[in-house]
Amino acid sequence: MKPVELSDSNFKSEIESGLTLVDFWAPWCGPCRMIAPVVEEIAGQYEGQVKVGKLNVDDNQQTAMQFKVMSIPTLILYKDGQPIEHIVGAQPKRAFEQMLNKHVGTPAAAN
């Protein structure tokens, strides 16, 4: 499953229920490109438990400013529309899994 493309206009409706992990990124950001495959893996691994989305901060500055995203990549985990946890910077896949597993337990399709 691919991450959902988020924008200023659809952001609120996409994160309003359940768990949603949002990757705040930009195409020119090297660390963002480095973790992109990991974010895609996470989307597949946690399918049905966590929605995964990507928000290009260059094209959607309003949402990035609303959540005080100052550095990218920043990944924020939302529960029912409210931010509950975040990771700033490129991290290994295990760091994202540890964050998510605290809220969902073990993923259904763990590798």
Image: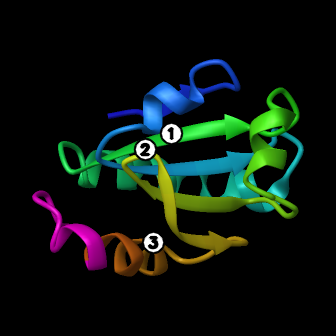
- Could you say which disc has been placed on residue 52 in the image? 2
Q: What is the number of callouts on the image?
A: 3
**Quadrant of the image for the C terminus?**
bottom left
**Quadrant of the image for the N terminus?**
top left
Q: Which residue, as the protein is rendered here, is positioned at the far top?
A: 9
Q: Real-space Cα distance between discs 1 and 2?
A: 4 Å
Percent x, y of residue 56: 75, 35
Secondary element type, mark 2: strand
Q: Is residue 103 left or right of residue 81?
A: left
Residue at x 34%, y 69% (from the top left corner): 100
Q: Main SS type for the magenta part?
A: loop
Image marks 1 and 2: residues in contact by CB distance under 8 Å? yes
Percent x, y of residue 14: 45, 30
Residue type for callout 2: Val
Identify the image's colour scheme: rainbow, by chain, secondary structure or one colour. rainbow
Percent x, y of residue 68: 80, 58
Badge 1: few (under 14), some or many (20 or more) residues near its Cα, within 10 Å? Answer: many
Q: Is residue 3 visible?
A: no
Q: Is residue 67 left or right of residue 47?
A: right
Q: Is residue 71 left or right of residue 1?
A: right
Secondary element type, mark 1: strand
Q: For residue 7, what is the image quadrant?
A: top right
Q: Is residue 30 above or below residue 59?
A: below
Q: Which residues are magenta?
A: 102-111
Q: Nearer the viewer, residue 52 or 83?
A: 83
Residue at x 57%, y 21% (from the top left corner): 10
- Could you say which disc has been placed on residue 53 in the image? 1
